[in-house]
Image: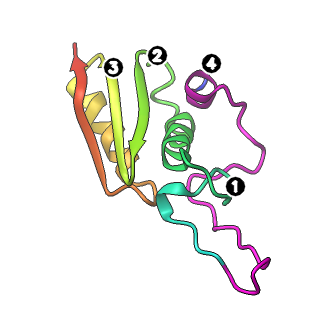
Amino acid sequence: MGWLQRLFGLEKPADAQVDPEPATSDDTGGEESIAPERLGLNGEYDQSGLAKRVALAFDEDGSFDDIDSLYVAQTGGTVVLKGSVPSQDILDQLVQVAQGVTGATDVQTDQVSVG
């Protein structure tokens, strides 16, 4: 089971992207801007967009497939990792991937146990 499925109950949408272009709305005659941390998998507004895109990035990496005791949340632009991981090296890799997602301003790991 992938990260998106486990954390959000979502199958990966066919056109889902870690860093999609924001969708625009012309309803008001102008373009509305979506904050990077609220950008969904397809460029739409999503309150948990950053966390979902980080989960998608973990799914796409492939080396994190066996980790099922870590959870991803967000507080604004901060990615919050919670749970446990087998080693500090893996945690460092997860942090590096999360930091590479557009909209991530910080990655919080104080709720992660190693070992």
Going by the numbered disc 3, the residue's amino acid type is: Gly
* Rendered residue at 32%/46% (across/down): 96
Residue that badge 2 annotates: 68
Confirm whether the magenta stretch covers residue 19: yes
Q: Which residues are magenta?
A: 3-31
Q: Secondary structure at mark 4?
A: loop
Marks 2 & 3, CB-CB < 8 Å contact: no
Measure the C-alpha gap from mark 4 to mark 2: 9 Å
Disc 2 crowd, CA 10 A, few/some/many (<14, 14-19, 20+): some
- The quarter holding residue 52 reads top right
Confirm whether the magenta stretch covers residue 8: yes
Measure the C-alpha gap from mark 2 to mark 3: 9 Å
Horizontal side of 84 relative to 59 (left or right) equals left
| Number of numbered discs | 4
> Viewer-nearest of labels 2 and 1?
1
Q: Secondary structure at mark 1?
A: loop
Measure the C-alpha gap from mark 2 to mark 1: 25 Å
- The quarter holding residue 113 reads top left
| Quarter of the C terminus within the rendering | top left
Give above or below for 29 relative to 87.
below
Residue that badge 3 annotates: 83
> Viewer-nearest of labels 2 and 3?
3
Spot occupied by residue 31 in the image (x, y as percentages of width and height):
68, 81
Spot occupied by residue 97 in the image (x, y as percentages of width and height):
39, 45
Going by the numbered disc 1, the residue's amino acid type is: Asn
Residue that badge 4 annotates: 1
Marks 2 & 1, CB-CB < 8 Å contact: no
Residue that badge 1 annotates: 42
Which of pointers 3 and 1 lies earlier in the amino acid sequence?
1
